[in-house]
Image (cartoon, rainbow, N blue to C red):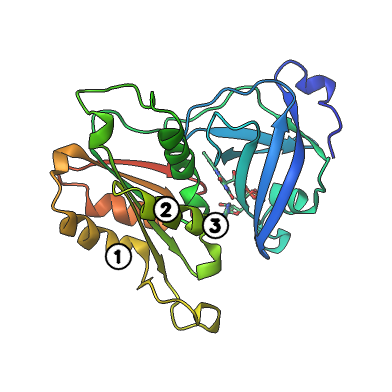
Amino acid sequence: MAETASPRMKGRFTTCELVRREELTEDLIKFWIKPAEPFVFKPGQYCTIGVDGLERPYSIVSSPDEPEIELFIEVVPYSEGGHLTPVLDDLEVGAQMTLRPRAKGIFVLQPGFKNHIFVGTVTGVVPYISILRKFLGDSGYPEPADGVAREDYNFHVLEGASYDDEFGYDQELNELASKHDFIKFYPSVSRPNEERNANWTGAKGRINLLVEDYVAALGVDPKETCIYACGHPQMIEDVGRRFADTDYTFVEERFWKED
Ligand SMILES: Cc1cc2nc3c(=O)[nH]c(=O)nc-3n(C[C@H](O)[C@H](O)[C@H](O)COP(=O)(O)OP(=O)(O)OC[C@H]3O[C@@H](n4cnc5c(N)ncnc54)[C@H](O)[C@@H]3O)c2cc1C
């Protein structure tokens, strides 16, 4: 574990402390980290954390207004080529990590659209949670852009997972959707017939196969609609292809590349 940054890292790194962790499933963990210095980011951006010089980027779940940075991490076992995540999985509360001082990323709320269709697989839901938390907690966000008033914003979160215990933020999203007409949550499991999904009563099938019909049923103006895709590279490619020759705007964030 990196107690402090090595001399080589000096000046380019700050540190953070793991202050809370929660295991969602065997391979999905939530981390709450406290930066040693103020850490500025926009909802949708990512931070880069590291242990012993090994670093990876992680999109941020929390709103910039929260005191800690929340992360939602899928552990890739060593046997499947994972490097940092098995190390993170072993960390205990109180552990120190390095943190790049600047947040990065352009996968943020796109200005000028009334309808925001957030498509994600498992951890790909992360940037959307940050955007929604900020939107709901800060009446000044986003700054008025291209004539879209705050009350004209509509958010649709479409999340796919193999199993219903992998959504991560389904409780929060269901609560938001029940409180606010302008937020909808549409989760789908891709392996509905497996025992682990025995209690699942929602949508079934890969989320990329459901997006077109979902969006068509909304009857929204494509020019006023931005479709975001984040998470599994195959899902992103497929959704991108489906909306390629349309008037919808499409933006993406890939967490990893297909081998
Ligand atoms: C901008 C950005 C934001 C990211 N945000 C998140 C996030 O919020 N949560 C998160 O868990 N990860 C996120 N990642 C991925 C993360 O940076 C790591 O790649 C991942 O955690 C695996 O790290 P590793 O060192 O264990 O394995 P790596 O050495 O990074 O990768 C090992 C192998 O696993 C593959 N792989 C990486 N991630 C996965 C995955 N989830 N499922 C299946 N195969 C995978 C890689 O393509 C590679 O073949 C993000 C990546 C980017 C570029």
Q: Amino acid at mark 2?
A: Gly
Q: CA distance from mark 2 to mark 3?
A: 12 Å
The mark total stands at 3
**Which residue does the numbered mark 2 point to in the structure image?**
120
Q: Residues within 10 Å of mark 1 (few under 14, many from 20)?
A: few
**Which residue does the numbered mark 1 point to in the structure image?**
209
Q: Any mark on residue 110, and which?
A: none
Compared with 117, 207 (above or below) is below
Q: CA distance from mark 3 to mark 1?
A: 21 Å
Q: In the depicted view, which residue is nearer to us: 5 or 145? A: 145
Helix, strand or loop for disc 2: strand
Residue 121, image x, y percentages: 45, 57
Q: Residues within 10 Å of mark 3 (few under 14, many from 20)?
A: many
Compared with 174, 13 (above or below) is above
Q: Residues within 10 Å of mark 2 (few under 14, many from 20)?
A: many
Q: Are marks 3 and 1 in contact (CB under 8 Å)?
A: no
Residue 59, image x, y percentages: 54, 40
Q: Amino acid at mark 1?
A: Leu
**Which residue does the numbered mark 3 point to in the structure image?**
168
Q: Residue at x 43, y 43 (%)?
A: 128
Could one spot residue 107 in this view of the protein? Answer: no
Q: Amino acid at mark 3?
A: Gly
